[in-house]
Amino acid sequence: MSGRTRLALCAAAATLAASCALLPLVSPASWILQAILLLAVQSGVGAVTRRVPLARPLTVAAQALATLMMLTLVFARGQAFAGLIPGPEAFRHLAGLLREGADDVGRYAIPAPQTDGIRLMLVGGVLLIGLIVDTLAVTFRSAAPAGLPLLAVYSVAAGLSDGGTGWWWFLIAAAGYLMLLLAEGRDRLSQWGRVFSGASRPVSGEPGGATAPVRTGRRIGALALGIALVVPLGLPAMQGGLLGAAGTGVGSGSGNGGTISAVNPLVSLRDSLNVDEDRTVITLRTDTSDTSNLYLRIVSLDDFDGTTWKPSQRHIVGVPDPLPAPLGLDSGVKRTEITTTISAADWYGQDWLPMPYPPSAVRIKGSWRYEPVGMTLVGDHGQNTRGLTYEVKSLQVRPTAEQLAAAPEPSAALRNEYTKVPKSLPADVASTARRVTEGATNHYEQAVELQDWFTLGGGFQYDTQVEAGSGPQAISRFLKDKRGFCVHFSFAMAAMARTLGIPARVAVGFAPGTAQSDGTMAVGLKDAHAWPELYFEGVGWTRFEPTPTRGSVPTYTQSDTPGTRLPEPTAPSEDASTAPSAAPSANQSCPPELRRLQECGGPSAQAVQVQGDDGPKWYAVLGWTLGGLLVLALPLSPLLWRRRMRAVRLGAHGRGEADAGPHILAVWQELGDTAWDFGILPDESQTPRKAAARIVRLGRLDEVAAASAHRLADAVEQVLYAPRPRPVAGLAEDVRRVAVGLRDTASRRIRLRAALAPRSMVRVVWAASAWWNALRSRVSARVAAARTRLRGPSEQQGSGDRAEASG
């Protein structure tokens, strides 16, 4: 095997070793098997192009083209020419998957599900890093800078894993980089002689003495590994969500300014709805008797990109006292100020403060700041709600249907910001909204018709087992399959409202909790909720409830107009079921106790998650299985090879004079390799007697093992110098006694190294290299002979023509 081929293998192995740090981020981790296969193809393309040889830029271009084609084959074969050659449609599909993956990264908590977008980011990222490492270390023969992309992979993984990954991933990444450095050092010195070669270069001195490239590699590796430990401490963490149990703190500064950007709570909300135990998150006491509208709002999602809803980056200020009046609320709308005392559980550490909307004043201890657009409070420098008790004054706004129906158009700036719909939104979303609201004369009637369609007339069913979904087709799929939970209903209604010109956003928080005997309300994890807020000039942001069996339908959505299909106000969420309902509204045949335990039946459906093909083909399953077995076998291959080689050399042969010589030499080579595995480098410049004495001295062997080593040396000298070598019995046992003696005096680390990663394994590399060189020589000789045979008749014909012409 040539030096560059060996270096390419080490570069690919180093990339995979560093990429292992990404495994805890996604579940399941089967993407790594796909990355291994594609990285092997990428390295193979590089090895072939360097053999041609091509210019360095062409080699890199060939690998990049092969990488793109492989990604197209795996992720966009349906949009490519012949399933392999990418075109405009394939590039658009890949770009869409990358956008989905970026959204999924911000949406999901660790470990995130293996969506197509996340899988493309992981596999594509590994291939990109592999291409960079291969280019630096192999094509341009500079392995030290190749540590930077490897460090980047580990640092990103450590940062996303809350400041650091497990120490075993760190050791794997470190071993990969050091292996790459040592391979490059050996390749550079191969022109002067093998560093570890017993056959080509004598090595003397005590074991453990490192050569110059080894020392340099250790220093560079130690520096890089130190940086890898420090860098992750400064990276942000991807943890939890808006409804998670631990907060990480947001914002910076003194509290007089700055910005804030929230994370998307889709999976955190879904996980809260599906918990086995409905733990109490918040306990509250309020001075109002009507708790059906007492929603605790955490944050609003107002940025809609066609794939999902997420919070915009907003300016934050110090908390004013009192809080400003809500946007758009006129004095003619009836309102009542209520006071609510809220206590958060000791385990619930939320960065955003759950409050009734709209708040007018807040009394709370700690470091908090105010976001004016959403009227929310956010913790500063790690401040969260864990164990806090605070008091909120808020307004219960009671608009009438007539006031909402007569609401004038909002300002152009507000309308432009909150009615934006991206071009990627499927056309059937807008067409469905127009069909459902056909005949409505104003935005209020359109909003009520949409709410009524979701809760009563549309045939939708409530199911918390449905995935949150991602991609431009998510809302369209939900409208078709008609099964989901509050995220689907609120997202879909807000998007449809925007297509009708109604300013809309989505609020996330908790629905009204369960009344207790002591007059308090208990809000549990299963009360986590999302609902749409629509803007009406003169009233402001107004809550609607499109989710069947959840929360309460606002009273202002009831109209006196005869014939309208409007829902009656329902009870608070304590009677809501989190199981799939058997009808569009609440399943009356299921007792409330069973609904609370999610035992009302109904199959779950992966309605919103965009599905791919009908499943993997048999050859794909076979390939992944073989790949998995290969990955499992690789760490044990040195151990298995060494045992096999020892059994062959010490086998039951050499009993006659004919094969006495080969047997004794094979046993002697096994003795040298065994000593090599325990750190005694071979030195074939010495005589067998001196070599045995050296093994006895450096291995600190006892008398029995030393006698066995000298007996082997005597047998080898007889083979080398006697006219007719005689068989010698017991040589295999002598080698085993020497091995036991070396093992007894070695440290645990050396014994493990000798068993799992024996140094004598390098003979496999040398044998493969010799075989390859011999094969190349035979092929070259045959090609030359073939050229001579093909050229011979033509040359003779040319000579005859010249002779005829001269005659």
Image (cartoon, rainbow, N blue to C red):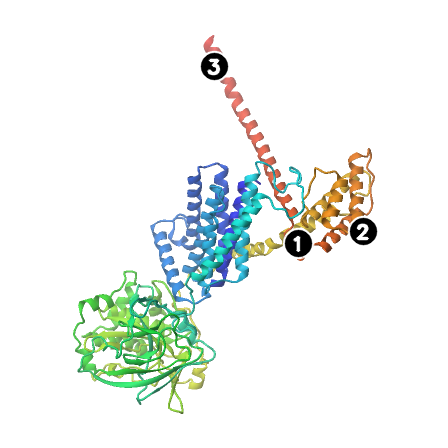
> Would residue 31 be found to the left or right of residue 513 on screen?
right
Spot the residue most to the top.
807
**SS class of the residue under badge 1?**
helix
Residue ID for mark 1: 750
Front of the two marks 3 and 2: 2
Residue type at mark 1?
Ile
Residue ID for mark 3: 801
Spot the residue most to the front.
254
Q: CA distance from mark 1 to mark 2?
A: 22 Å
Q: Residues within 10 Å of mark 3 (few under 14, many from 20)?
A: few
- Residue 695 position within the rendered picture, expressed as x and y whole percent measured from the top left: 73, 46
655 up-or-down from 748: above or below: above
Q: Which quadrant does the N terminus fall into?
A: top right
**SS class of the residue under badge 3?**
helix
- Residue 215 position within the rendered picture, expressed as x and y whole percent measured from the top left: 57, 47
Residue ID for mark 2: 704
> Mark 3 or mark 2: which comes first in sequence?
2
In the foreground, 526 or 496: 526
